[in-house]
Structures are given as C-alpha cells and as structure tokens.
Amino acid sequence: MRKKRIKNVVKQVFLTQEENARLLALMSEEGETNFSAYARKKLFNNELESWTVSFPEYEQLTEQLIQLGRSINAIAKLSTQVGMISQSDFIELGQLVTRLMEAVEKEISVISQKKSRKK
C-alpha cells in the first residue's frame, strides 16, 4: 500500500515593518510562534487541524541545523545558477556537512549518556 504524498504549496506575503510588528503581536496574543500555523488557522477559520510538537532540548541543535542548511542551500543555488561549483564552495560545503555530522553525533552522544544515567 502506497502512502499518499503530500506536497506543500508555498505562499508568500509581503509586509511592511509596521504590519509585521502587528502580526507578531497578534500571534503572541494567541500564543502562536509559527506563522504558517497561524495563517492557516485564520484563513480557514479553524477548519484545519494542526499539531505543534516541541522538543526544547533540541532547540540549539535545530538552530545549528537550520543555519547549516541555509548555507548549503545558498551554495547549491549559486552552483545551479552558474552551472558549476567553485573549489572554495566545494571545500566550504564539505566543512558544513562535517559540522552538521559533528553536531548530530554530539547530540546523539548526549542523549545516550542521559539514557545510561537513568538506568
């Protein structure tokens, strides 16, 4: 049995700084930190169900992964536009992937140590 593939459609909204500040205040009033979830809730009048899962212990790792992902995407985009990747970009890409692996390995190690202490 094949799972149905869900494809997200990206929609962009351009706001002035004042509009953005107002939006953030409205989101804060409702305890919402995710714009996509907030927009869906407002656009569809709560017709859609959504869940937010939070793992505060992974926030630092998540932020590192996001930053690394952005850097990797920037290099990939540039190489696609130019049609080739420079040696320095290739080296930087390798360093970024190494940092990514180190961050994940470090987190796995911390989790393993915590689990072994609980036993």
Image (cartoon, grey):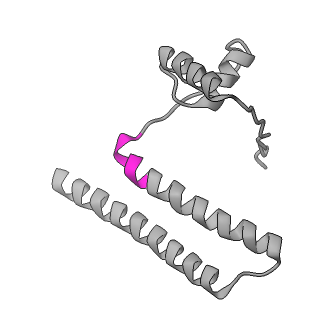
Whether 81 is among the magenta residues is no
Residue 93 location in percent, x, y?
A: 58, 76
Kindly give the residue lying farthest to the top in the view shown.
45
Residue 116 location in percent, x, y?
A: 21, 58
On the picture, is 28 further left or further right than 38?
A: left
6 and 99: which is toward the camera: 99
Residue located 35% across and 60% down the image? 107
Residue located 58% across and 64% down the image? 71
Residue located 54% across and 20% down the image? 27
Q: Which residues are magenta?
A: 55-61
Kindly give the residue lying farthest to the bottom in the view shown.
87
Number of numbered discs present? 0
116 and 103: which is toward the camera: 103
> Is residue 112 positioned above or below 62 on the image?
below
91 and 56: which is toward the camera: 91
Q: Magenta: predominant secondary structure element? A: helix
On the picture, is 10 further left or further right than 33?
A: right
Residue 30 location in percent, x, y?
A: 51, 15
Q: Quadrant of residue 75?
A: bottom right
Residue located 64% across and 22% down the image? 19
On the picture, is 83 further left or further right than 34?
A: right
Asked whether the viewer can see residue 119, the reply is no
> Is residue 50 positioned above or below 65 on the image?
above
> Is residue 12 positioned above or below 41 on the image?
below
Asked whether the viewer can see residue 56, the reply is yes
